[in-house]
Image: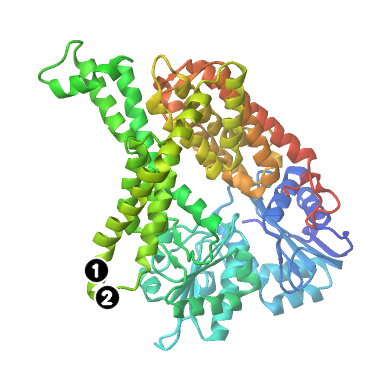
Amino acid sequence: MSALITPELVALDKNLGTAPSSVIRHLAELIVGSGRATEIEGLYADALAREAKTATGIPGGLAIPHCRSSAVTEPTLALARLTSPVDFGAKDGPADLVFLIAAPEGADQEHLKILAKLARSLMKSDFTAALRAATSPAEIVELVTSVIAPVTVGAGAASAENANAGTSSTSSSVKRIVAVTACPTGIAHTYMAADSLVAAAKAAGVDMQVETQGSAGLTMLDPAVIAAADAVIFAVDVDVRGRERFAGKPVIQAPVKRGIDEPAKLIQDALAAARNPNSRRVGGNVGVVETDTKNEHFGQKVKRALLTGVSYMIPFVAGGGLLIALGFLLGGYEITKVADVVVLQNSLFNLPEGGLLIYLGAVFFKIGALSMGFLVPALGGYIAFAIADRPGIAPGFVAGAVAGFMGAGFLGGIAGGLLAGVAAASFAKLNVPRWLRSLMPVVIIPLVASIVASGLMFLVLGGPIAWITTNLNEWLTGMSGASAIILGLILGLMMGFDLGGPVNKVAYAFAVAGLGTATIANQAPWQIMAAVMAAGMVPPLAMALATVVDRKLFSLVERENGKAAWLLGASFISEGAIPFAAADVFRVIPAGMIGAGVTGALSMAWGVTSKAPHGGVFVFFAIDSFPLWLLAIAIGTAVAAFVVIVLKRYAVRKSSVDAENPALVNA
């Protein structure tokens, strides 16, 4: 195993300017000059992209910029000791000791363990003091080597190196906390946060066990340790693997850097959460954290309720729409007229005229139509559920069914669900005698809330909403020519705006709500569905293409996300572009909107239709003019990729991360 640091990789007592970029570039030049990386620009861009995500300054006058890069050929450390400290974002001031940790994309586990060991050693004051007192690059190399030497091939290392690092205590009076630390690259912050939390816990007399989900491997916490814990800390910048293991535990979640900067505060917050019966807790499902919604303002509550309703509605729509499409494929378009009779009067042993295909087509079509019939009730039911929990489901479903009966469509389902949820939540707050409490959630609240919500829909709101819905649908579906292209453009812009958020969901809900009204004579709803699905595929596909065309503009993590975005985009999962938007919202979102708008307009202009509401390219059989549909997606994808590349190259705002050469930073 070659040395990670050599004297040629040490710059002692240098003045490298006032911006982090100048320091990082100098260290990148040292690494390339020593033959450990193939190009300066690639390594420099990857390190800056990581810096833009989270500042790498840490307490004590230190900074640890780090990255994985395809330009790096072997794991390497480079050090700059500065005469003029540079601000890397630490709370206690600028840094005079800067380590650049550079790892290849496929670095082996043993090298990564050594890098983690170094990152942890930087938290020790005697080690950093020795680095500041060293008189030569050779002495620096000797100091670093002495720190990382104990970790050898095959060694699991000392207790601080174990994934389950922590303090231990057998006293039942000592509070117990477990934690998970993780950062995007998993090289430095993951392990430094773990050690900081352990040290702070020891000072506070708290038993702390930490699971580091980093590049040096993962050993999960013992389930018994988790079960005995009073609270959990997630100091992470990425999703927690196996989050469901912590279900029900009071949780404090924070960026991984807070685990380094404010470990004592996180521990005190966790102890307070353990004492508070109403504290935020980890949910029972993977990736779900139940949150305290008491402090939500009205707009946030409505948004959360609408998104919940739409998310629960989509499986009914997706499954039902695909079944209807299969029904058309097998039985032809005339199946809509005969499906009821064929299904009721025939069977596999008594096939109708036309044979097996007609019968199966009728069965698929009818199952799909019945599934689609739950669209509005499910929307209303789960909006109410988001507001009032389980007691709101039945009133919401009933109010949604009333909206469907009155022709109020998904707008009526939204109104009915909100009414039902508010009514159910209001009655749940009543202070009733103890003998009546058990009847409230299963009898009284569903009964009264159903009467209130559905009564208001019948007597007051249903008629006006039905009139609005009917006229709106007639106006939109009656668009043709230039008007239809404008509609496709608007729907495309909406699909690209928030990538699965409220605006995206409104456009999608409008499209699927019209599927049930489409006929051979009126194919406008099918055209709208094709435009919406195509537009929603563009943002992730565009980001995937951009990472291939100009990979230097994207970090290693983004390039890895780009590989997954190909499949997500092809499957019509707009959320595949969210990791890119989260890191660079002001350039990714506009680019995605432009590309999606172009695709929506082209799809409508070419009259492409889709009888399936979901599935992307995998429901090709349900899309007429499939080659034209693919062409519209390809054009929009190319446009969005071109725009995001141009914006990343030239539309750059100056920041403290790179005040001197901002053109290479993902701000």
Residue 370 lies, in percent from the top left, at 28, 33
Q: Residue at x 39, y 63 (%)?
A: 426
Identify the element where label 1 is drawn.
loop
Closest to the observer, 269 or 385: 385
Residue 636 lies, in percent from the top left, at 62, 26
| Residue 564 in sight | no
Quadrant in the rendering for residue 520: top left
Closest to the observer, 388 or 661: 388
Which is more N-terminal, label 2 or label 1? Answer: 2
* Direction front: furthest residue: 459
> Mark 1, mark 2: which one is toward the viewer?
2
Amino acid found under the numbered disc labelled 2: Pro
76 in relation to 133, above or below: above
648 in relation to 176, above or below: above
607 in relation to 46, above or below: above
* Direction left: furthest residue: 349
Quadrant in the rendering for residue 356: top left
Residue designated by label 1: 438
Q: Residues within 10 Å of mark 1 (few under 14, many from 20)?
A: few
Identify the element where label 2 is drawn.
loop
Q: Quadrant of the N terminus?
A: bottom right
Residue 594 lies, in percent from the top left, at 66, 32
Q: Residue at x 35, y 43 (%)?
A: 458
Quadrant in the rendering for residue 129: bottom right
Q: Which mark is residue 127?
A: none
Residue designated by label 2: 433
Amino acid found under the numbered disc labelled 1: Ser
